[in-house]
Image: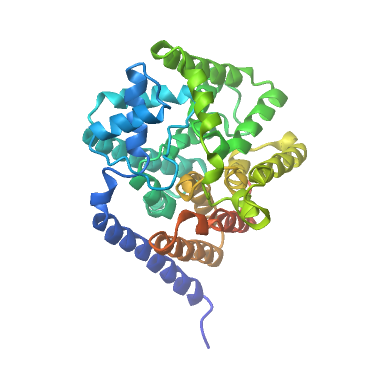
Amino acid sequence: MTNPARRPNRVRILLWVGIAACLGFLLWVVPARAGQLLYSGDAILFWASGRLALAGENPYDEAHIVEVLAQAGHPADFGAEPMPHMLYPPWALPVVMPFGLLGYPAFRLVWLALNLAVIALAAHLTWKLYGGSSRLAWLPFLLALTFAPTGRVVSIGNPAPLMLLGVVPFLALVGSPSAKPSRGKDLLAGALLLLATLKPPLAYLFLAAVGLWVLYQRRWMVLLGAATSLGLATLAALAFNPAVIGQYFQAMGSYPLGAWATPTVGALLRLALGVDTFWLQYLPSLLGLAWLAVFWLLRRQDWDWLRVTPLLLAVSLVSAAYAWTYDLVLLAVPLVAAAAGLLQGSPRRMAWGLGVYAVLNLIVLVLYTRLSDFWLFWLAPAFLIWLVWAQRGQPKKA
């Protein structure tokens, strides 16, 4: 008769085989495509816009961006697709501008190292916040850095990982429901939220929940910190280019957002019910806000940021009006948090939970080489289902 005690060990072996397969696949694919990474993706557009902003020129202007790209040796031919723009808000420009001082190859290396460091730091802090074992302190790095969207985002150089520096320190500073409020910590937590607004649709439910929580708990220093950092960043952008706010809105108004087939529920609805029915792109976000209203009313009296943030981020990404699969790097926080919780539960549940994740992640890594982003529209919903299952039965923190 089979010994039941051995079954979790078998599943644990499958788990490590799955993680090893993910790591091996990354080590095979990344060197093979290294030559494509230097002059591809969002990094070069990010750098070009920073260079223009630093010179006081319009960082959203297509002609200026093409000119800077040509100087850097980039073939500015995007085929029939609309050219990607720097569509980040003006308060994001001070994040970009210092990198404009570098030549492009140097920037690309620094930017790659920075993104990897940010993801690793966020994983480490999340692991500690959620009570992860010190014996397995290496595990959050392995999970976060072999996560399929991580490879995608660092390869194209999108700034989405920087948003983790707005979310995770916020949890560290004000996340504990039993901690006594501190004016200094609240001020710093609010100031760092600026980074979580670099791409507002990605974390919109988290940001909305922060607003509700500030009003309900009267944590005005969080609001002051957020307003101060937002104001100073915007003023810094205006100091170099007083017309930058108008230029941003002009770019947003003229850019064909509807032309992109994003891997979102909204885009799927448009494909099914009519591509020209543009309001369907935003319907999931409206439903997400309705869900948050109910969720807040039920949880507001015992609100626990450590408990709710993984779910808020996952639902935000499922219902975002615009997102790409590399934006799911924000799910590194829920992933590491769920892994820490699973390791505190039964060995069988832990092994199955992380095993299913490893298999799903490997499938996505393989599909990345075969399909366009749109056909991975199921990835964020699949991760949400996994997260809800992983959180069930986890002990609540005292």
Q: Position of residue 245 (x, y in %)?
A: 50, 19
Q: Residue at x 50, y 51 (%)?
A: 335
* Nearer to me, 378 or 220: 378
Q: Position of residue 106 (x, y in %)?
A: 22, 34
What colouring method underlies this structural image? rainbow
The image quarter in which residue 16 lies? bottom left
Q: Residue at x 72, y 26 (%)?
A: 216
The image quarter in which residue 175 lies? top right
Q: Residue at x 30, y 59 (%)?
A: 29
Residue farthest to the front, as pictured? 80
Tag count: 0
Q: Is residue 132 above or below residue 197?
A: below
Q: Residue at x 36, y 35 (%)?
A: 45
Q: In the rendered view, does 178 fall on the left or right side of 19?
A: right
* Nearer to me, 51 or 210: 51
Q: Position of residue 143 (x, y in %)?
A: 41, 53
Q: Position of residue 390 (x, y in %)?
A: 58, 57
Q: Is residue 181 above or below residue 391?
A: above
Whether residue 398 is visible to the viewer of this picture, yes or no, is no
Please state, as top left, top right, bottom left or bottom right, where the C terminus lies in the image. top right
* Nearer to me, 97 or 71: 71
Q: Is residue 32 above or below residue 170?
A: below
